[in-house]
Each structure stands twice: as structure tokens, then as C-alpha cells.
Image (cartoon, rainbow, N blue to C red):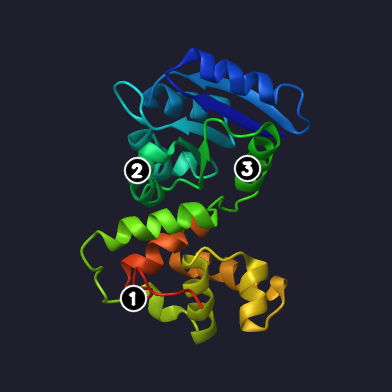
Amino acid sequence: MIRVVLADDQALIRAGFRVLLTGVDGIEVVGEAADGAQAVRVARDSRADVVLMDIRMPGVDGLEATRRIGADEDLAGVRVLVLTTYESDEYVYQALQYGASGFLVKDIEPGDLVHAIRVVARGDALLSPGITRRLIADLVRRPRPNTTKPQALAALTERERDVLARVAGGLSNDEIAALLHLSPLTVKTHVSRMMSKLAVRDRAQLVVLAYESGLVIPGTPAE
């Protein structure tokens, strides 16, 4: 059973998500929060697997709550799905740095919401090509990243760096497999090994690391 916490300062939105998730096989809403500080407490007390996290909340906002969850070893198994709108894309990069596993818009279709929760609960990232493109656009506006690779990045094989560059471009495992003439299972294995070597939580943080390390420069093609 996937245990979900709903964090949004608007009770009506929380109620709407609760209605959408009630009765869905394998998913249980175990708590609600109206601000970020409460979201962290409820996630801990309820032993949540996934937190649907609004960004703009009073007091402690969703970004800070995401940071606290990502930094807390006791909450290492909690995945954060950020609730966003096109107007709040400037928060995408920071949320990824803090450990968010993906992003949803508040008018998401019920089936897509259920799919998203299941994706991040199993440890994958929900980073669509659309979100990736906006992330890259944001990075283009920032100063050029430090091109000195972290020591951990030196531990990657040449093939793993090839895969990482394509992950940073928003490609799926199947797309990377076709491009590099590998099997999807082999690509998945490379991604898992990279996450272990680089000590990152998920695919989303691999994207951030690829750009921050200078392995991929914003604006360059993924192929």
C-alpha cells in the first residue's frame, strides 16, 4: 500500500485530491497538511511514502519542506511530488536540488495522478520532457555551471556518462536504449548504478548533477 500525504494550504484542493484517490487500489491517503512544517511532521508520523507538496504555503513553504524531508535520514524513503503551475516554473530547479522526485499540475487528470504517485513511490522520477525543457531554459539563464566535475563523477564509466547526458536531456530509458543501441534493461541498470555511485535519490537529481557538474551544458542537444 502506498501511503500518501496531501500538503496544500487550500482545503478544497486537498479534498479534491482525497476524493480522486479514495478507493484507488494500492493507495491510501494517510494525512493532510496546510503548511510545510505540518507536512514534514505528518510525513514522519504517518510513515508516508509520497507527499503531494504545494509550493506556495504560509509560513514554511513547500520548497523548505521538501528540503527538510530530503535532508532527514529518517525520511529517506519519502518521495515528494511538487504541485506546480506554469507560473511557478522558476521553482523547478530549486525543488529538484532539494530532492523533489517530480512535478504535477493541479488540474491533472485522475489517471495521471495515480500513475505519478506509483512512479515516484517505486523510486523513479516523474520528470517529463516538458518539465526538462523548462528546467534547461532556466539553467540557460543562469551563470555557466562549474565545469570541474565532482570527484564522484570521475567514478562513472564512459558509457555511464553517455547515459547520464541523455537522462539530462529528458529522454526515457527506452529512448536512450534506441539511441545508444542498448537494451532498456541495460539502460535501467546504468541509471541505478549511477544513482548509487553519485549518492543521489532519484533520476531527477541526476539531471541537476549533470548540469551542475558541467557534464552537460544547457542548450546543447541530448543526442
From mark 2 to mark 3, how far is it between C-alphas?
19 Å
Q: Write down the residue under mark 3.
A: 116
Report the amino acid beneath label 3.
Ala
Q: Earlier in the sequence, mark 1 or mark 3?
A: 3
- The answer to whether 198 is drawn above or below residue 107 in the figure is below
Q: Earlier in the sequence, mark 2 or mark 3?
A: 2
Q: Earlier in the sequence, mark 2 or mark 1?
A: 2
* Residue at (34, 68) in percent of width and height: 218
Regarding residue 203, the answer to whether it shows in the image is: yes
When asked about the image quadrant of residue 9, the answer is: top left
Whether label 1 touches label 3, CB < 8 Å: no
Q: Residue furthest top?
A: 11
Mark 2 or 1: the one toward you: 2
Secondary element type, mark 2: helix
From mark 1 to mark 3, how far is it between C-alphas?
33 Å
When asked about the image quadrant of residue 63, the answer is: top left
- The answer to whether 156 is drawn above or below residue 140 in the figure is below
Q: Write down the residue under mark 1.
A: 151
Regarding residue 202, the answer to whether it shows in the image is: no
* Residue at (53, 53) in percent of width and height: 127
Count of picture labels:
3
- x%, y% of residue 29? 64, 24
Q: Write down the residue under mark 2.
A: 91
